[in-house]
Amino acid sequence: MMPTPDTEYRNGMRIYPVPGPNGEILHFPSVTTVLNILPKPASLLNYIEWDPEKAEKNMKRRAMVGSTAHYYFECVQARKLQNHNPIIEEDIQFNKFFNAKTAKAIGEICKKIALYIRFNDFEPWFLEEKTWSHELQTAGRVDFIGKFNGVSCILDLKTAKSFYPPENGIDPHALQLAAYKQGLKEVHGIEVEKLYILRVNEAKQPQLKEVSDDKDGFLMARELFREEHGF
């Protein structure tokens, strides 16, 4: 991946420069980078072990599909915001992965996103908003902050084929959105009522999943990350 204007990469880990309390620049790992420390689902590990090369290629292709779908979601929502100009910030390798199968998947996902937005009430306050938390020492970029069907929320878009079940009672989605919620509170002073994952895949109908605010779970993952990587 290529760094965005406000991120950098260290050993494959996404790092955000953020302002410190005394005007200094601090460097926090991204929320998703921290959560990579958690054990992977057994089904995913078996798939990677069975055919590592195929698994890596498919994961890169799905990442490109996801990035494109996020860009489309942002573009549609941006019509409701003034002075918000969506940009593709990732180095999406279309030349390697944009074949007929990928094009069909992207088309189906974007069509479902458009219909879902049409038949639900979205009122964006922020799109792809960078937030960070000094308490959690992490940062991230949030897909959607605003009102969904009249309820204030953080909403994160996923394009995976299914929701992975929690491992040992830990739901990574709950940890991810809890970190975003804390960052939103610290940076903008905003509290939201709900935390949602919207999963839109080419093969299934969209699914909305409400997750809990598991900040304690994220703090645990953050400590594991610090022990492993030293920051």
Image (cartoon, rainbow, N blue to C red):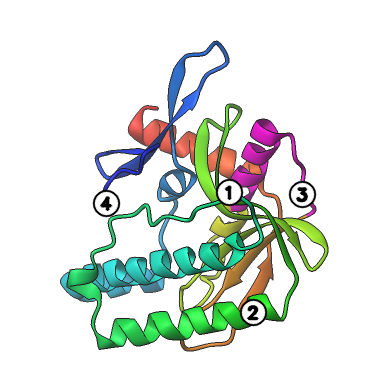
Residue under numbered circle 4: 1
- Residue at 27 percent across and 74 percent down: it is 58
Q: Is residue 132 magenta?
A: no
- Say which amino acid is labelled 2: Tyr
Q: Is residue 192 magenta?
A: yes
> Do tag 2 and tag 4 residues touch (Cβ < 8 Å)?
no
Measure how far apart labels 2 and 4 are at the Cα level.
Answer: 30 Å
* Percent x, y of residue 130: 53, 41
In magenta, the rendered stretch is 177-193
Q: Which of the 4 image quarters holds residue 118?
A: bottom right
- The label nearer to you, 2 versus 4, is 2
- Residue at 39 percent across and 74 percent down: it is 43
- Say which amino acid is labelled 1: Asn
Q: Which mark is residue 184?
A: none
Badge 1 marks a residue whose secondary structure is loop
> Do tag 3 and tag 2 residues touch (Cβ < 8 Å)?
no
- Say which amino acid is labelled 4: Met
- The label nearer to you, 3 versus 1, is 1
Of the image marks 4 and 1, the number of the one nearer the N terminus:
4
* Percent x, y of residue 227: 40, 32
Measure how far apart labels 4 and 1 are at the Cα level.
Answer: 27 Å
Of the image marks 3 and 2, the number of the one nearer the N terminus:
2
- The label nearer to you, 4 versus 1, is 1
Q: Which mark is residue 192?
A: 3
* 15, above or below 202, in the image: above
Q: Is residue 61 left or right of residue 54?
A: right
Residue under numbered circle 1: 83
* Residue found at the very far front of the displayed protein: 83
Residue under numbered circle 2: 116
The front one of 73 and 155 is: 73
